[in-house]
Image: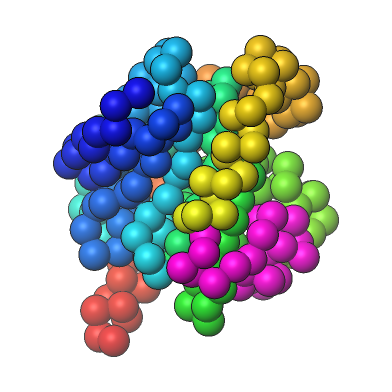
Amino acid sequence: MQKTTQQLDTLNIDYKDKYVIIQIDNGKVNAINTPLLKDLRQTIDALDEDDKVKGAIFTGRPHVFSAGLDVVSLATMDQNGHMEFWESYMYLLQSMVQFSKPLVSAITGYAPAGATILVLCTDYRIMAQGDKHVVGMHEFKMHMQIPEMLCDVYTYHLGEIDAWKAIQQKRLFNSDQAVEAGLVDESLPVEEVLSRAEEYLQEQIAVFHKVFGQSKKWFRKRLRKLVLDRDVPALAKQTVDFNRDPELQAKVVEFMMQLKKK
């Protein structure tokens, strides 16, 4: 396949020999907003249908994977905007989980909260070392409710007891801690993350594609059930309705004001 690069508003897509590197390029901190979610879903679905593509790597820029959800944008959305955002996020999780080919995360920097859940839907995760490079769910710090599907994905990887404990402690994991907890698979210097992801992906591409695809379905049967067998509009509405609580909204606004003072 001829090497080409495709640029979307929020992504850079680099076509290599037999595989593709999907790089988030969405502003200074690669915040997750509705356009990014839609671009990612469209890209992943298209790559799954492309017989010339045998696998993909999901990455960010050096030292910046994604800061998580664009909370500033969410704070200013109306109800329809919130519905569109959460439906887009959950539909993306479905596309990632049912992607039939190898999908490897090269976590090149910080990837907390909503970014953590995205990488947990990939097959293998390689994370950059660094004090500010973290994964984990710290929504309690912001008084934000974690939607049910996202809770399910986090619990799938950590286990119910440890996931709930980590949520209460607002715990973020550096790369070595994330390996120990089972959230990521390898911890490397940032300059080695992408090349190692390419090496690992090529190993998986070498497996006969029908064997890999069917095995992926069988080995991730519980994750598929948690993500695919769900009513996305109903779950999105559940999230939006909960977040309309006036007391909760006041707490989120208070947190946002504190951020602006820093």
Query: Could you tell me which residue is drawn at 64 percent across and 28 percent down?
Result: 206
Percent coordinates x, y for residue 76 in the rendering: 21, 53
Q: How is the image coloured?
A: rainbow
Would residue 52 be visible to someone looking at this image?
Answer: yes
Name the residue: 24% across, 79% down.
260
Residue 245 in sight = no
What x and y, as percent, mark residue 154? 65, 48
| Screen quadrant of the N terminus | top left
Quarter holding the C terminus is bottom left
109 versus 120 height, above or below: below
Residue found at x 48% / y 69%: 190
Q: Position of residue 87 (x, y in %)?
A: 39, 30
> Most extreme residue toward the bottom, as rendered?
262
Residue 74 or residue 107, whichever sits in front? 107
Query: Is residue 97 highlighted in magenta?
Result: no
Q: Nearer the viewer, residue 12 or 36?
A: 12
Q: How many marks?
A: 0
Segment tinted magenta in the rendering = 169-193
